[in-house]
Image (cartoon, rainbow, N blue to C red):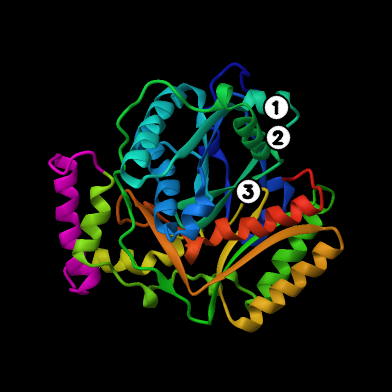
Amino acid sequence: MANPLEPTKHFYGGIPSFNRFSSLVERDRYHEFPDDWHIVITDVKGSTKAIEAGRYKDVNTVGAATIAVIQNVLGRFEFPFVFGGDGATVLVPDEYIERVKASLMGLKSLSKSTFGLELRAGAVPMSEVHSRGGSVEIAKFEITKGRSIAFFRGGGLTVAEKLIKAEAGKYEIEGELREPSMQGLSCRWRPISNRRGRILSLLVAARPEFQESTLKEVVDFLESVFEGSLDSANPAAYAGMAYKSFLQCVRDEIRYHRSVFSRDFLSRICEILFCQLVFRLRLPLNPATDHYARAIPSHSDFRKFDDLLRMIVDCSEEQVERIRGFLENLRLQGKVYFGLFESPTCLMTCFVESIQDGDHIHFIDGGDGGYAMAAKQLKSQMKEGQSDLC
């Protein structure tokens, strides 16, 4: 039996993964997180207004930067996270939390000075969540060989989020500031157009008393809508991907750095030049880079679960209406709350440690503010239903 006082920093890395999305409803896939970790949650304050002003790409970039900054602090250490569009949720072992906080303070400063966006960042000890009756259970979904994303259940993330918002003085991150590293983060692909007519951003919250059976019902229905495979609804299609121009890439890159004279910035400019040749002009300079580009769809997080079912899917108008009607019927039965938002494109923000399989992940959100705009409908339904989920 493990010593309860022994640090459990490798807990997540030791969890077995699964590769069938529908298995998210299987209780034995989940493992209770130990006490000696922190839940870190970030979100862009006023994100809805920023998105309505056309700044959805900036909001996405700052949200995904949380994950990149923490990964650059922890190196190759494996930790669980979920990207939510205007922020992220990350679990970090206690022994790393002070270094993570310092880098997130740097990210908050960078976000304000170069993007004009205020990033809220808070950290709650897992032990505090447990003491308040919350639970964080985690599973690992293998999106492709060598790359998994975390699924969460138990309601503990909601407990942590409420604490951060209600008791900012206690849980919001403050103190020492460390210059954040954005190494590996990029937003160099143009918005990806739909193939079927619509990009649908979808959020589904099942009522606790019906969660397992309802989620199974929802996932089974969605798989039937997409002819037995959600993979066919992946909006990150290689054929629809187009690289931004050199000037657009450079303008974006400038905002990741305090100085354009740093070695890191100059290295990234050289990288952009090479990528222009390979991805924009499609010159066959290296078979590995072509393989990387074609592997992007299988390394994307277009479907996930963190007590909320989150999906960005490519749909026809008829499929959108089938999904809307099905979810509305479940809502009227008192089983779910949901949010839907339609847009013509999806956005992709990339975190690339290397171009080898398993070393890159691509965060997907609907265009025009996808997840954040779907969340408006979800929250409205929750408020109307006076749900304890909101």
- In the rendering, at what x and y percent does residue 99 appear? 39, 25
Q: From the viewer's perspective, is 216 left or right of 35?
A: right
**According to the image, label 2 marks what residue?**
135
Query: How would you rate the neighbour count of disc 3 (Cα within 10 Å): few for under 14, some for 14-19, many for 20 or more?
Result: many
Element at badge 1?
helix
**According to the image, label 1 marks what residue?**
130
Q: Amino acid at mark 1?
A: His
Residue 200 against residue 102 in the figure, above or below: below
**According to the image, label 3 marks what residue?**
306
Does residue 291 show up magenta in the picture? no
| Nearer-N-terminus badge (2/1) | 1
| Alpha-carbon span between mark 2 and mark 1 | 6 Å
For the residues bearing labels 2 and 1, Cβ distance under 8 angstroms: yes
User: Residue placed at 41% from the left, 47% from the top?
Assistant: 62
Q: From the viewer's perspective, is 21 left or right of 205?
A: left
| Alpha-carbon span between mark 3 and mark 1 | 17 Å
Q: From the viewer's perspective, is 94 left or right of 361?
A: right
- In the rendering, at what x and y percent does residue 4 appear? 63, 19
**Front residue of this view, candidates 247 and 141:** 247
| Quarter where residue 70 is shown | top left
| Quarter where residue 136 is shown | top right
Quadrant occupied by the N terminus: top right
Q: Which residues are magenta?
A: 257-285
User: Residue placed at 63% from the left, 48% from the top?
Assistant: 306
Work out which residue is located at the far right of the displayed protein and give it: 333
Element at badge 3?
loop
Residue 138 seen anywhere in this rendered image of the structure: yes
